Image: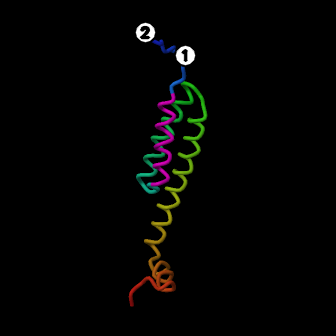
Amino acid sequence: MKKESVSMNSSNNSSGVTSVVFGILSIVFASLIGIILAIISIGFAIKQNKSSPNKWSKAAMILSIIGLILSILIIALDAWLRKNPQILNQVLTQYGSVPQ
């Protein structure tokens, strides 16, 4: 049986796939963990883009940026609500979620 040889010119998508996974996780865990995952994902996307640019690196960069922006917005909203707890209490009281 003849073995097939793998050429060295074939594109390797491992960094691209890894960056897409980290990009998706950065959206799912949008907070401080999301920022860390987005930065890791951007690093892998840049590495993939340098070695062999393809759709994986582009998709990963888009997901990472979305995850990074979402994480920053959630952290900013959390900080704002911690400084203004009366707003959160007012919203929760209006919708009947706070026990009286």
Q: Position of residue 73 (x, y in %)?
A: 53, 60
Given the current orientation, which residue lies at the most extreme left position?
99
Between 58 and 89, the residue placed more toward the observer is 58
Q: Position of residue 47 (x, y in %)?
A: 51, 30
Rendered residue at 50%/53% (across/down): 27
- C-alpha separation, residue under disc 2 versus residue under disc 1: 24 Å
The residue carrying mark 2 is 1
Instruction: Work out whether 11 lies above or below 98.
Output: above
Which residues, given as a range, are shown in magenta? Answer: 13-28
Residue 9: give its label: 1
Residue 67: give its label: none
Is 39 one of the magenta-colored residues?
A: no
Rendered residue at 48%/41% (across/down): 41
Between 34 and 9, the residue placed more toward the observer is 9
Which picture quadrant has residue 1?
Answer: top left
Disc 2 is placed on an element classified as: loop
Given the current orientation, which residue lies at the most extreme bottom position?
100
Which badge, 2 or 1, is on the more N-terminal residue? 2
Graded by Cα atoms within 10 Å as few (under 14), some (14 to 19) or many (20 or more), the crowding at tag 1 reads few
Rendered residue at 45%/41% (across/down): 40
Instruction: Work out whether 83 lies above or below 57.
Output: below
Is 20 one of the magenta-colored residues?
A: yes
> Which is the main secondary structure of the residues drawn in magenta?
helix
- For badge 1, the amino acid type reads Asn
Instruction: Work out whether 86 lies above or below 22.
Output: below
Q: Position of residue 59 (x, y in %)?
A: 58, 41
Question: What count of labels does the image hold?
Answer: 2
Disc 1 is placed on an element classified as: loop
Instruction: Work out whether 26 lies above or below 40.
Output: below
Q: Are marks 2 and 1 in contact (CB under 8 Å)?
A: no
